[in-house]
Amino acid sequence: MDESGRGARVFAEEALLGLIGPFWQVVIGAVVLVVLVLSVGRLARRGRSRMTTALLVTAAVIAGFAVIGVLLEG
């Protein structure tokens, strides 16, 4: 049977996307990291009370995501 037909092209496209996918994840992760570092630097310059509030809000968000994850897992 000839494997150079339509099905072979689909496999080639999936292989190409499989190679590109991790690269884009790295790019998105790098952009998020840069924005995070810049925002934390700006927040630190604003003073101690704003940093405390930001840390409390961040902790609440993390706890919320954890609870949602546990509830949706079961």
Image (spheres, grey):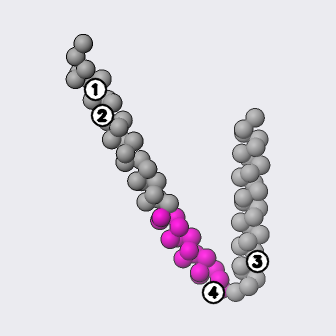
Residue 35 horizontal/vertical position (percent): 52, 70
Query: Is 53 left, or right, of 36 in this rendering?
Result: right
Q: Residue 16 carries which label?
A: none
Looking at the rendered structure, the secondary structure element under dot 4 is helix
Distance (Cα) linking label 1 and label 4 = 56 Å
The local crowd at label 2, few if under 14, some if 14 to 19, many if 20 or more residues have their Cα within 10 Å, is few
Distance (Cα) linking label 3 and label 2 = 51 Å
Residue type (three-letter) at the residue carrying disc 1: Ala
**Residue 45 covered by magenta stretch:** yes
Q: Earlier in the sequence, mark 3 or mark 2?
A: 2
- Closer mark to the observer between disc 2 and disc 4: 2
Q: Earlier in the sequence, mark 3 or mark 4?
A: 4
Residue 40 horizontal/vertical position (percent): 61, 76
Which residue is pictured at 47% across the width and 65% down the height?
31
Looking at the rendered structure, the secondary structure element under dot 1 is helix
- Closer mark to the observer between disc 1 and disc 4: 1
Count of numbered marks? 4
Disc 2 designates what residue?
12
Extent of the magenta region? 30-46
